[in-house]
Image: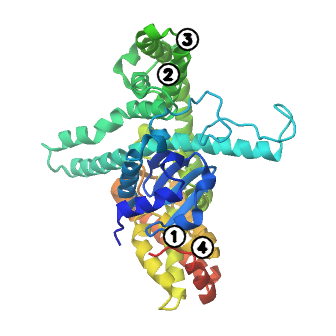
């Protein structure tokens, strides 16, 4: 059912404290992500009851409202319009700049990657770990992961679009079809990837409080052909060395340099000296340090992923497939985007995404088992019918928050299905049949157009399909046998679910 985006956005805004309480607005494929100045002003119970809201993830002040694919784009646009139309006094976030990453955060500032001291905690700095400090450490790590995800999330639509076009182009080239069109299609599909470092640098500076275009300018050095004439540590550099990790580090360095200059350069010279010094200092640091280091890290990431699947494929796939649903539930799966992007740059595809996609297959199998176990008139069956199409296409949140998580045990049996599917794909990786994805984002059936591997498209698709079927089957069987789905349990869970 298509929801009214304007009314949904209008219903959500007062329940998160109004425009004055919203410090940031972003979206991913299924979630509206909100930063709130005062999380206590949000009404979680009422938010979950808003028509069209499939679930809510609350993580250290970050509110992630699960709306599903398509709907999230429309609701986010409507939400931003409401924020933009609010009086200036009610929308301070629109005027104030993002807090500097290296400035001392206020006690209630959300999303700052520092480690604030816990008021009232015994001892001060260096007093040793306390429960409060451990919570602060966890909050700091999650904040860093959220900010890294915010760098890459806006890039996902282009990654998906260009990845699909690259797959189509590869099929046409291999089949010898449309030889007059394929060169143009290659350019269209690969243009974004060739300049991915620039977009990463731009978004990094924007997220961490720098001037976005300066972050992009410094990151552009990473992919400039002229770096081949530069020698660092006695070794000539190569264009693209370090990839997205190098671009990320370069933009972070540029942001640091820019903030240092802003506080020391006279205002009359700021417009001239600050940009020049930022690009010069950060650019030289990128060439003579960051590119070399990031290149080593990128190579290690690629080697580690290949070694993991080649030597411990079945076990690695089992663990990764089992743990991915909890990561999705917490919203932490976005932290893997830089790893995927690095693998795609190095090898043309990421071998981790198809393994992780098996978690969605286990979720679908579990939901099917719940559907079968329920009475024909059970309201929860309507929710499952509505959420299954999205689940088959790899969007798992509707099934997580609408079915398995409220029921409890089916969430665990869904993880078992994901583990089985991941072990299946990992086992074939041990045999030398690597399955990869040329872009980030889709999974489930939607990943088929993006598949790539080292044994040809037919073998790659067959292994991936086998993993999906294994995940469906084990998820279904485990839930049917051990899911503990009774009429009373389902009725109790259905009372807390939003309307489908």
Given residues 500 and 435, the one toward you in this image is 500
State which mark lies toward you, 3 or 4: 3
Q: Residue furthest left?
A: 180
Residue at left 41%, top 59%? 9
* Quarter of the figure with residue 87: top left
Determine whether the residue tagged by mark 2 lies in a helix, strand or loop: helix
Residue 338 percent location from the top left of the image: 50, 41
Residue tagged 1: 49
State which mark lies toward you, 2 or 1: 1
Q: Is residue 455 left or right of residue 366?
A: left
Which of the two discs, 2 and 4, labels the residue nearer the N terminus?
Answer: 2
Residue at left 44%, top 58%? 30
Where 404 sits versus 284, above or below?
below
Residue 465 percent location from the top left of the image: 42, 66
Residue tagged 3: 264
Q: Are marks 1 and 4 in contact (CB under 8 Å)?
A: no
Tell me the quadrant of the picture where the C terminus can be found. bottom left
């Amino acid at each position: 059912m298509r929801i009214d985006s304007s009314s949904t956005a209008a219903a959500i805004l007062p329940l998160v404290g109004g425009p004055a309480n919203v410090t940031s607005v972003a979206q991913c494929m299924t979630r509206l992500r909100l930063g709130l100045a005062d999380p206590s002003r949000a009404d979680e119970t009422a938010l979950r009851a808003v028509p069209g809201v499939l679930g809510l993830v609350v993580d250290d002040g970050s509110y992630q409202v699960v709306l599903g694919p398509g709907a999230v784009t429309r609701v986010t646009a409507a939400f931003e319009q409401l924020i933009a139309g609010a009086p200036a006094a009610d929308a301070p976030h629109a005027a104030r700049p993002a807090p500097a990453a290296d400035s001392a955060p206020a006690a209630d500032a959300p999303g700052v990657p520092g480690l604030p001291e816990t008021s009232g905690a015994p001892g001060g700095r260096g007093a040793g770990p306390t429960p409060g400090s451990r919570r602060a450490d966890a909050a700091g790590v999650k904040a860093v992961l959220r900010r890294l995800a915010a760098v890459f999330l806006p890039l996902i639509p282009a990654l998906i679009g260009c990845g699909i076009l690259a797959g189509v182009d590869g099929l046409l080239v291999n089949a010898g079809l449309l030889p007059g069109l394929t060169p143009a299609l290659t350019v269209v599909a690969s243009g974004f990837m060739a300049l991915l470092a620039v977009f990463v640098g731009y978004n990094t500076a924007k997220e961490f409080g720098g001037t976005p275009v300066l972050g992009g300018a410094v990151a552009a050095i990473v992919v400039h052909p002229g770096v081949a004439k530069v020698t660092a540590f006695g070794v000539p550099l190569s264009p693209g060395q370090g990839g997205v990790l190098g671009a990320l580090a370069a933009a972070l360095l540029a942001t640091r340099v820019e903030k240092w200059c802003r506080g020391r350069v006279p205002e009359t010279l700021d417009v001239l000296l600050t940009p020049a010094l930022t690009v010069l200092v950060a650019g030289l640091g990128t060439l003579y340090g960051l590119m070399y280091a990031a290149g080593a890290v990128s190579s290690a990431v690629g080697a580690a992923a290949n070694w993991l699947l080649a030597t411990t494929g079945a076990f690695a796939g089992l663990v990764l497939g089992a743990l991915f649903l909890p990561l999705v539930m917490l919203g932490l799966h976005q932290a893997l985007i830089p790893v995927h992007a690095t693998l795609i740059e190095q090898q043309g595809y990421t071998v981790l995404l198809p393994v992780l996609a098996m978690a969605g297959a286990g979720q679908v199998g579990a939901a099917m088992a719940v559907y079968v176990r329920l009475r024909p008139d059970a309201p929860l069956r309507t929710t499952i019918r509505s959420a299954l199409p999205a689940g088959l296409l790899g969007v798992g949140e509707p099934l997580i928050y609408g079915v398995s998580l409220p029921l409890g045990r089916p969430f665990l049996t869904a993880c078992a299905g994901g583990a089985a599917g991941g072990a299946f794909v990992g086992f074939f990786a041990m045999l030398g049949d690597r399955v990869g994805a040329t872009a980030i984002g889709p999974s489930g059936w939607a990943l088929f157009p993006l598949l790539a591997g080292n044994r040809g498209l037919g073998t790659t698709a067959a292994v991936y399909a086998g993993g999906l079927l294994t995940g469906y089957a084990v998820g279904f069987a485990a839930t049917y046998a051990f899911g503990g789905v009774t009429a009373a349990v389902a009725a109790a869970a259905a009372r807390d679910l939003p309307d489908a």
